[in-house]
């Protein structure tokens, strides 16, 4: 299932499937992007980041894709597990070389069902 | 290392009151940022402190003020509380490109 970003804030997938969460950002000057996972009652947890001089970055089970032309970011989660259920936020840094003010998207609620 | 810690965990205040929230950064981090997260929304940047000074500020009124101490810990103060100030207040500490969020303080204004 593919989420189209801010217009569909929920995504339900079956355990084992791949998840794709999308995010549109607004400022072409943003140079650093971060995906966070937030579980209920907890603060955001860093998942993966990417700089504007890259278009893809891979982590453990996660991949972030950056399309600067259309100002679009996506998070791909492979073999989604029940523990992946959470709200996912993309954030853009406009602080230049210093990690500063982060602008967060609205978030996507990912639900993984067995 | 306990990571970023915040206190208190929960807080209930009434309109017009003042509140102080506290944050201890992760060891080695020298910068503290505060965010407000309303229910169902993403965090919104309030301000950032570095070397005991406010370095950046978001679109929040002067009722929101802060402080950073020599040990890098920080406080967020909100005066004249409004119902709309009810939210999860998050502290994030950082050093270079490394940033971690605390668990937040849930503030309820009645």
Image (cartoon, rainbow, N blue to C red):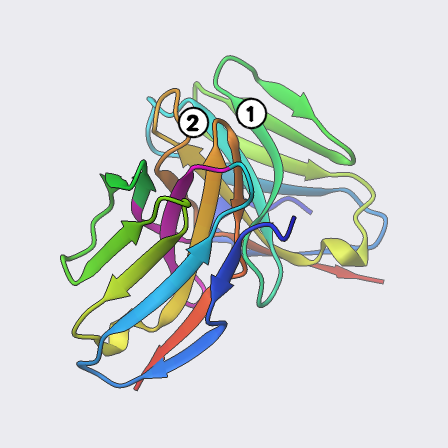
Residue at 77% over, 42% down: A18
Residue A23 location in percent, x, y? 50, 39
Q: Residue furthest front?
A: B70
Image quadrant occupied by the C terminus of chain A: bottom right
Q: Is residue A24 visible?
A: no
Residue B75 location in percent, x, y? 33, 58
Name which quarter of the figure residue A30 lies in: top left
Could you tell me if the residues under marks 2 and 1 are in contact, i.e. CB atoms within 8 Å?
Answer: no
Name which quarter of the figure residue A98 lies in: top left
Residue A73 location in percent, x, y? 52, 32
Name which quarter of the figure residue B20 lies in: bottom left
From this view, report whether residue B54 is shown above or below residue A64: below
Q: Residue furthest top?
A: A53
Query: Closer to the N terminus: mark 2 or mark 1?
Result: 1
Q: CA distance from mark 2 to mark 1?
A: 13 Å
**Disc 2: which residue:** A71
Residue A31 location in percent, x, y? 42, 22
Total numbered circles: 2
What kind of element bears circle 1? strand
From this view, report whether residue A66 is shown above or below residue B4: above
Q: Is residue B2 magenta?
A: no
Boundaries of the magenta span: B29-47
From this view, report whether residue A44 is shown above or below residue B63: above
Chain on which label 1 sits: A
């Amino acid at each position: 299932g593919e989420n189209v970003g801010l217009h569909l804030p929920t995504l339900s997938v079956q355990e084992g499937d791949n998840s794709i969460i999308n995010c549109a950002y607004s400022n072409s000057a943003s140079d650093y992007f971060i995906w966070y996972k937030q579980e209920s009652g907890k603060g955001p947890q860093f998942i993966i980041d990417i700089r504007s001089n890259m278009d893809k970055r891979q982590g453990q089970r996660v991949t972030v894709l950056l399309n600067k032309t259309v100002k679009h970011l996506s998070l791909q989660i492979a073999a989604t597990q029940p523990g992946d259920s959470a709200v996912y936020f993309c954030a853009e840094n406009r602080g230049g070389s210093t990690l500063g003010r982060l602008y967060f998207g609205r978030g996507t609620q990912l639900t993984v069902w067995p | 290392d306990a990571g970023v810690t915040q206190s208190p965990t929960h807080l209930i205040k009434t309109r017009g009151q003042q509140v102080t929230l506290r944050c201890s950064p992760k060891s080695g981090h020298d910068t503290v940022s505060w965010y407000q997260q309303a229910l169902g929304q993403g965090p919104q940047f309030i301000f950032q402190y570095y070397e005991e000074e406010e370095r950046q500020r978001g679109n929040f009124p002067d009722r929101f003020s802060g402080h950073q101490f020599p040990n890098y810990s920080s406080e967020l103060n909100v005066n004249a509380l409004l119902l709309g100030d009810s939210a999860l207040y998050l502290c994030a500490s950082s050093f270079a490109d490394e940033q971690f969020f605390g668990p937040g303080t849930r503030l309820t204004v009645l």
